[in-house]
Image (tube, rainbow, N blue to C red):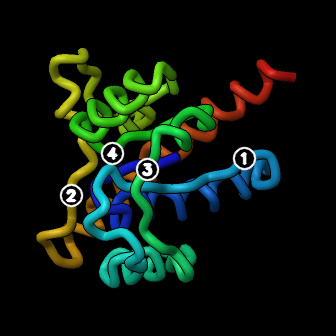
Amino acid sequence: MTVCTGNICRSTMAEVVLRERFAAAGLGDAVTVCSRGVSDEEAGNPVDRRARAVLLAHGYPGGDGHVARQVTADELDRCDLVLAMTAGHARVLRRMAQRRGVDPPVVLYRRFDPAAPRVGERDEHRLDVDDPWYGGPPEFEVCLAQVEAGADGVVARVRAMLHDRA
């Protein structure tokens, strides 16, 4: 599960990219990718038109049929990996899980980017995927580039998780 604020930009772009990467790695049938938001402010809305445009421009599906949803604690309990787009999202997800007594593996998405800075927990905010919401095409391009940079690392991690279960 990829998680951002409203589930119409960052997490949705990550969901689309990861589905493509898992399919290319031959894992499309073995892995379910979904996205959610920590807020309900965009619940029911489609993917942001600017996110859709940048995805299509880079050869990805545009997220047609996507409907923004807020994450629930029940969903966290069923996830093998929860990818937070920012340190703030990670804190919200961890608190939500703690209240339910579950411990899903919440990881900042950019921890899988080999070029991202290596930081400790206090500096996790340096790994935030940039929020393109208040920007235009250049900001959405940066966001997609950050998502793409971590995607192969996510695929490798999930492949190892599947191998360990076998």
Query: Is 113 situated left or right of 92 in this image?
Result: right
Q: Which residue is mark 2?
A: 131
Q: CA distance from mark 3 to mark 1?
A: 19 Å
**Farthest front residue?**
100
Q: Which residue is mark 4?
A: 85
For marks 4 and 2, the one nearer the N-term is 4
Q: Which mark is residue 71?
A: 3
Of the residues shown, which amino acid type is indicated by label 2? Asp
Kindly indicate the quadrant of the structure image that contains residue 157. top right
Kindly indicate the quadrant of the structure image that contains residue 24. bottom right
* Cβ–Cβ under 8 Å for marks 1 and 2: no
Q: In the image, residue 158 lies at what x, y percent? A: 65, 34
For marks 4 and 3, the one nearer the N-term is 3
**Farthest right residue?**
166
How dense is the environment of label 4, judged by Cα within 10 Å: few (below 14), some, or many (20 and up)?
Answer: many
How dense is the environment of label 2, judged by Cα within 10 Å: few (below 14), some, or many (20 and up)?
Answer: some
Query: Under tag 3, what secondary structure?
Result: loop
How dense is the environment of label 1, judged by Cα within 10 Å: few (below 14), some, or many (20 and up)?
Answer: some
For marks 1 and 2, the one nearer the N-term is 1
Q: Which mark is residue 31?
A: 1
* Cβ–Cβ under 8 Å for marks 2 and 3: no
Q: In the image, residue 161 lies at what x, y percent? A: 70, 26
Q: Is residue 105 above or below residue 1?
A: above
